[in-house]
Amino acid sequence: MELTTTVNDEPRAVEVGGTEVAVDVLRDHLGLTGTKLVCGSGVCGACTILVDGEPVLACLTPATRLRDCAVTTVEGLADGAELHPVQRAFAHHDGLQCGYCTPGFVVDAVAFHDRWRADHGTTEPTREVIAEALAGHLCRCGSYEGVYRAVAAACRGEHDGGAGIVERVDAPAKLTGAAVFTTDVVLPGMLHAVIRRSDVAAGLVGPITFPDGVVGVELLGADRRVRWAGQPIAAVAAESLAEARRVARELDVPLTPESFVLDPDEAVRPGAPLVYATRADRKNAPSAGEGGAPMPVSWDGNRHGPSRTPFLGTVAKRRISSARAAGRRGLVELEVGTTAQLHTAFEPHACVADWSDAQHLRVWLSTQGVDQLRLSIAERFDLDPTQVEVVAEYVGGGFGAKLSLTPEAVGAISLSRLARRPVRLVLDRHEELTATGNRPGSRSRVALLVDEDTQGIRALTVDSDSHGGVAVGGSAASLAMLLYDRTPRLARDVDVVTNAPPGAPFRGPGGPTSAWALESTVDEVAHRFGRDPIELRAQWDGNPKRQALYRWAGALPTWRQRQATGSRAGRYRRGVGVAAGNWIYIVDPDCEVVVSVESGRLVASSATQDMGTGSRTVVARAVAGVFGVDPSQVDVRLGRSHGGTAHGPASGGSRTTVSLWSTAVEAATTLRDRVGTDLSTVPDGATAGAKRGGDRGMRAVPVTMNGVQIGRGFSAALHVTEVEVDTRTGKTRVLRVHGGIAVGRIHAPVLARSQCEGSVIQGIGLALYENQVLDPHTGLTLTANLEDYRIPQLGDTPEIDIHFHEEGWDHVPGGGIGLGEVATVSPAASVGNAIFNATGWRPLTLPVRPDRLLEGLRAGVTR
């Protein structure tokens, strides 16, 4: 049927089917891809548009509802080149990161702003009013504090008349819908592909015969075994997405179900079904850690490990055993656990592959490593790397799950090779929440022995079982060895594999899990001996950067007014907790940046990507600083890797900024010294490049791991959190968080603050809400939508104060290192310790759900 409507003040007429919704019309028929499809169920708000001036959810609104209406999308908010005050406010206050959810936020915020200004003038709305107005919106990056600041400032009238600066150089593109993500790419003659997945947790797949005329490929390993429900079996392509779904659903897959195990406790019992039965199978187990293959340790059934990290480990074991036998008060032991936390990046895993030309493969991919993936693709498909081009101009989040060559890319590329046509394969939200990885659950046992008089550490052991489903590579225990005094200590990491979906690297892999175990135990020591938890950590900690953070935190009014643990009474009880964290310093020594002049403008390029962490802005600021111009005068070209591009770092492990900044400065300085600063006189083509290399901060014998080198020193973090616990409902509300971060010089302060605020939000999600649930009878994921898998919302956001300690990294070119990982390590543990301070009940399992808290309070014991 024909649908006539007006979109962004332009009359439009399109042919629609009876089942299409508004988001289909806008994206597929009209090419207005600023409206994003994320949840598909009206939960996240990313698809918000205005219909006759009122916000509606385009994923739920029937296409026919748009008939004869005035529709406004994010592309229509600006008045020509003049941004709406809300858009300017979001750019000024950095109310965005990856930008995938941003169009929905902005459209709804514009509607709220216009109503508010009409009724209240320039009176500022409260946080509560803003939270209620935008309650239907989610941001996985956690940019909520920036959203609050932006909406409040716009309503105060501070961005009327074009006022405001652009902190993030790509903010205008993200705020107007101009940014092109992989999910927005459409090529002529493109086929649509779908993955057929297993609906059983274990089984053996027989030969698959694809019907005549169907373009299909298998995605199974050589053993043809299914090991988890949701595992890819095959991919098929068709002229339309609906047809591809039908073909995939009707595909005859001969599958013989087998016994499976989901519970880690059951998995280690005698007679449990083996996830990996042979040595060859075990070698192909995926890794949940960052840095390549897991350590080569032994297997015992479904147990992989332990891998040991000892320092006088025998002494540590002996001291703790003796203290346990004697019942020493100085021995504190806790057993704690976590459940899997899902990445759920809002741009789903997506790939558009074009192998129409047999000699050249072009791949649009939502990835955290365009250059790394180009090499992986070339190796997988037996190509010379110069024959492969990977494009990821904008990436809608990743958090570690997009660092490797994943099935949607393999499927799309394989199908394009068969069809010699472009193929698009985009996961839906159910697949994204089932099959793309998670921060593994865990069970950790900590034994910390201290001197009963001085509370000096005498021994520490940490045993951690990683529950990464079919994946291995847990490191929580080992990471606990990197903090505090170098007294006798022993870490033992074990992977307990089950037929659950595989874990994958997630911001600071193993870090938050490690901090939850160690920092809860440290807090218990402080409580047992009546010590100030900050002062006790300062006594143990030799890291001078964290010592500065202890001094800062100890002087905070929030900390100084903290009451004794369990001293509060009444229904609502407030408490304050603290937790420390650190992370290794790593850098990509092969990072390259090229700076040139084109038509009188500076151009900087590198084969890296910006998934919301600010890489474009970092490069722009580095080059602009050398030439004395505004960063907006630098064109930064990222997100493209081919044979002629300069190698760029992947976005993972906090390596990106530290690799790019000094390299960009060096390249710009070389060019400036050659051509001067008057660019109007410089001929096109003037170019200078630089390669990062190591630095004087590298160890004497650099440790190389997955293309990066480990440098000297650890970044440091400290989080102080205040909570309010409702002892009647069991609900915990985080009121404020102070985050201290010691990574040296901050190259883009506003963006760095946003990163740290987002880390706090993700930590709150781990601590209080996020809980993957599998069906115990089938292994299928039950929390496969954003309604059942709860992530923090705008109204959950506390007041967040970020403090940067910028000293201590003079040995690093540029004077600073990355912060994406270290800022994520300790927030969840600080929430748990705050709950203990408020109630006297120590939570031992994350998330601290209301039912667990109420049960613990009733029993008067830790759970």
Image (cartoon, helix red, strand yellow):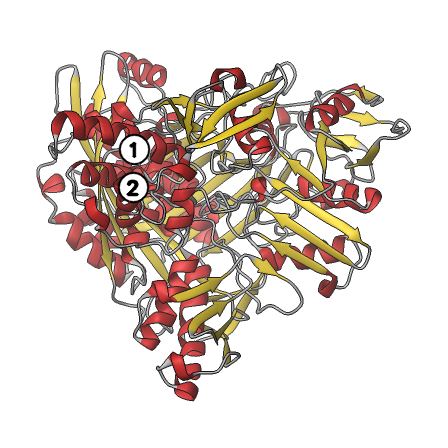
Can residue 282 be spotted in the picture? Answer: no
Residue 115's image quarter?
Answer: top left
| Crowding near the residue tagged with mark 1, few <14, some 14–19, many ≥20 C-alpha atoms within 10 Å | many
Q: Residue 366 or 77: which is nearer the viewer?
A: 77
Is 700 or 8 nearer to us in this picture? 8
Give the image location of residue 264, x and y in percent: 58, 27
User: Picture coordinates of residue 724 (x, y %)?
Assistant: 20, 25
The quarter of the picture where the N terminus appears is top right
User: Which residue type carries mark 2?
Assistant: His
- In the image, is residue 59 above or below residue 675? above
Q: Point out the tag, 2 or 1, that comes first from the N-terminus.
A: 2
Q: Amino acid at mark 1?
A: Val
Please say if 653 is above or below 423.
below
- For disc 2, the marked residue is 84
Query: x, y percentage for residue 807?
Result: 25, 66
Query: Can you see residue 184?
Result: yes
Quarter of the figure with the C terminus: top left
Residues at badges 2 and 1 in contact (C-beta under 8 Å)? yes
Q: Using the image, determine if residue 561 lies above or below residue 822.
A: above
Nearer to us in this view, 472 or 665 = 665
Q: Is residue 499 left or right of residue 702?
A: right
Q: Secondary structure at mark 2?
A: loop
Q: Which mark is residue 110?
A: 1
